[in-house]
Amino acid sequence: MFHTDAAQAVGKIPTRVDELGVDLLSVAGHKLYAPKGIGALYIRRGTPIESLVHGAGHEGGRRAGTENILLAVGLGMACDLASENLKNAKTKELRDYFWDELKRYFKEGIALNGHPEERLPNTLSVSFIGKVGQDILESIPELAASTGSACHSGMVQISSVLKAMKVEERVGKGTIRFSLGRYTTKEEIDEVVRLLKERV
């Protein structure tokens, strides 16, 4: 059996279960503008799965308890809107503009993590070489982003994902992952670039 956590993918790239060949696929609603607290698990017909909550026969006997219809409708509507938005290349264009601006200013002091093309259209993971991602984010409190490393007892360690990608330790420590949203503007990107130039 194969399960994929499609929380980051749904709403950004096509995620058709038959094309992917998965038996189970999970969706996090808040990642595609649905209300917080709703998600979904696709289960291919015939895939054996143990009940999560026992008691009544809801959800085909898989989970007892009354369904939250309002949240489910919210997830359905968010999926409809997201499928229409898949054709819109604006987010990808902004992400690429963001990367071009960072590269133009930081030159050899910045590296792209991941494949240059085969990646989510809304995500930009970069490493500021010789820096620590957490230090950068702490210097820009008005920016919400995530780092690719963690600090434990004064030691900075890169994530297991970056290690699996064979990103060098000295590079990976400076990793920041920026996520663009459906409503991100060029002006916001320009402001982030300005703050990074000023404080990195």
Image (cartoon, rainbow, N blue to C red):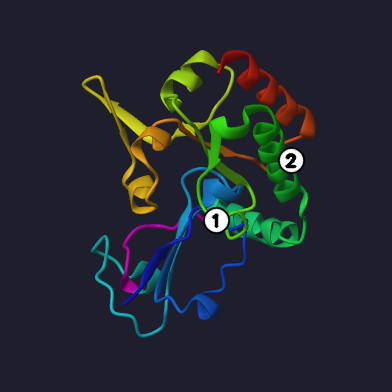
- Of residues 94 and 74, the one drawn nearer to the viewer in this rendering: 94
Residue at left offset 58%, top offset 60%: 118
Left or right: residue 136 versus residue 90 is left
- Range shown magenta: 61-69
Can you tell which mark lies on residue 146? none
Instruction: State the CA–CA distance, disc 1 to disc 2.
Output: 16 Å
In the rendering, which numbered label is found on residue 97?
Answer: 2
- The disc at residue 115 is 1
| x 44%, y 58%: residue | 67
Marks 1 and 2, the one that precedes in the sequence: 2
Q: Main secondary structure of the magenta part?
A: loop
Residue positioned 73% across, 56% down in the render:
85
Tag 2: amino acid: Tyr
- Helix, strand or loop under label 2: helix
Q: Is residue 167 left or right of residue 36?
A: left
* x and y, in percent, of residue 163 in the image: 33, 47
Q: Choose between 151 and 45: the one closer to the eye.
A: 151
Q: Amino acid at mark 1?
A: His
Q: Can you tell which quarter of the image residue 159 is in? A: top left
